[in-house]
Amino acid sequence: MINHQVVIALGSNLGDREANISLALELLREYLSIEKISTLVETDPVGGPIQDKYLNAVAIASTTLDPEALLIEFHKIERDLGRLRVEINGPRTIDIDLITYDDLEISNEIVTIPHPRAHLRQFVLAPWFEIEPEGSIPGKGSISALLGQLK
C-alpha cells in the first residue's frame, strides 16, 4: 500500500474545544499516521453567525486511503463528535478539513483538493508554517508567501 502525505486542519468552538480536537486526533489515528501537530491557536470565526472563538490546529500525516474515502471518514468522526451541519460557517464541536493530499489537484462531487479557501485562511497557514515552513499548496504557492500576502 502506498502512503500519501496529507495536511489536515482541525477547529472547534463549541464545548471543550481542546478536548474536541484531542479526541478527533485520537480517532483520526485509525486512518492516519500523524507525524506533526501544530500548537493550538485561538482565532476569530470567519463568516457565518456571531459565535465564539475557535481553537485551531494543523497536522501533517500519511494515509493509505484515497482522498474521497478519507473525507468520508472525516465526516463520520465529525458526526460522532456531535457536529451538526445546520448553517454554513456555523459553530461546531469539530471541523476536520483535508487541506492537501500529496501534490494532487482534484475537484469532484465529494472532494476538492487543495481545500479551496486554505490559502486565504491565516488560521490554517500560520499553524501549518509552524510545523512545515517549507510547505506549499499546489497551484497556490508556498505557505510563507501566502502568509505574507495576508498581512
Image: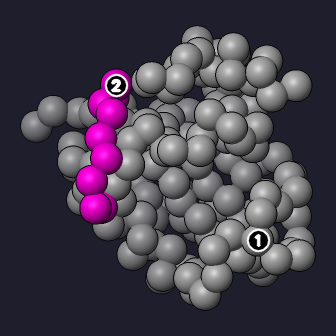
Residue at figure coordinates x 64%, y 82% from the top left: 87
Instruction: Quickly name the residue at label 1.
Output: 48
Please say if 20 is above or below 138. below
Q: Which residues are magenta?
A: 102-110
The residue mark sitting in front, 1 or 2, is: 1
- The image shows residue 90 at horizontal and vertical percentages of 71, 76
Q: Tell me: 141 left or right of 41.
A: left
Instruction: Quickly name the residue at label 2.
Output: 103
Q: Residue furthest left?
A: 1
Is 68 magenta? The answer is no
Amino acid on which the number 1 mark rests in the picture: Gly
- The image shows residue 129 at horizontal and vertical percentages of 68, 24
Q: Helix, strand or loop at disc 1?
A: loop
Q: Helix, strand or loop at disc 2?
A: loop
Which image quarter is the C terminus in? top right
Dominant secondary structure of the residues highlighted in magenta in the image: loop
Counting residues from the start of the chain, the first of labels 1 and 2 encountered is: 1
Amino acid on which the number 2 mark rests in the picture: Asp
Please say if 148 is above or below 81. above
